[in-house]
Image (cartoon, helix red, strand yellow):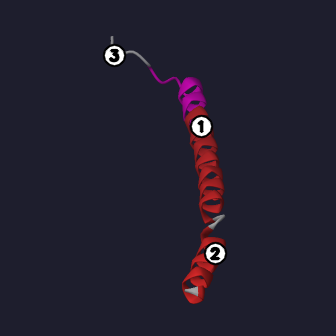
Amino acid sequence: MKTVILLKEIYEEGFKNLGNYMLKYSLKAFTWFTVIMLILVLYVFIHRLFSGFSFSNI
C-alpha cells in the first residue's frame, strides 16, 4: 500500500504544474500570432490605400 501511495504522490508532483505551463506558453504563442497577423493586415491595407486600389465594385 505504501508503494501505491508513493507512486500516486510522484505522479501528482510531476503533473501538478504541467497544465499551467502549457496554458501559459500556448497563450503567449497565440498572442504573438495575433499581433503578427494584425501587423500584416495593417500593412496590406495601407499598401492598398496608397497604391490606388479601388475598394468598391461599382
19, above or below 53, in the image: below
Provide the secondary structure element on which disc 2 rests: helix
15, above or below 25, in the image: below
Residue type highlighted by circle 2: Gly
Provide the secondary structure element on which disc 1 rests: helix
Residue sitting at the far top: 58
Task: Tell me the residue that label 2 is attached to.
Answer: 14
Question: Residue sitting at 59 percent across and 80 percent down?
Answer: 5
Marks 3 and 2: CB-CB under 8 Å? no
Measure the C-alpha gap from mark 3 to mark 2.
60 Å
Marks 1 and 3: CB-CB under 8 Å? no
Looking at the rendering, in which quadrant would you find the C terminus?
Answer: top left
Measure the C-alpha gap from mark 2 to mark 1.
38 Å
- Give me the disc on residue 57: 3
Quarter of image, res 11 = bottom right
Residue sitting at the far front: 1
24, above or below 7, in the image: above
Magenta region, residue range = 44-54
Provide the secondary structure element on which disc 3 rests: loop
The image position of residue 12, as x and y in percent, is: 61, 71
The image position of residue 43, as x and y in percent, is: 61, 36
Quarter of image, res 51 = top right
- Residue 49 among those drawn in magenta: yes
- Left-right relation of 55 to 37: left
Looking at the rendering, in which quadrant would you find the N terminus?
Answer: bottom right
Question: Residue sitting at 44 percent across and 19 percent down?
Answer: 55
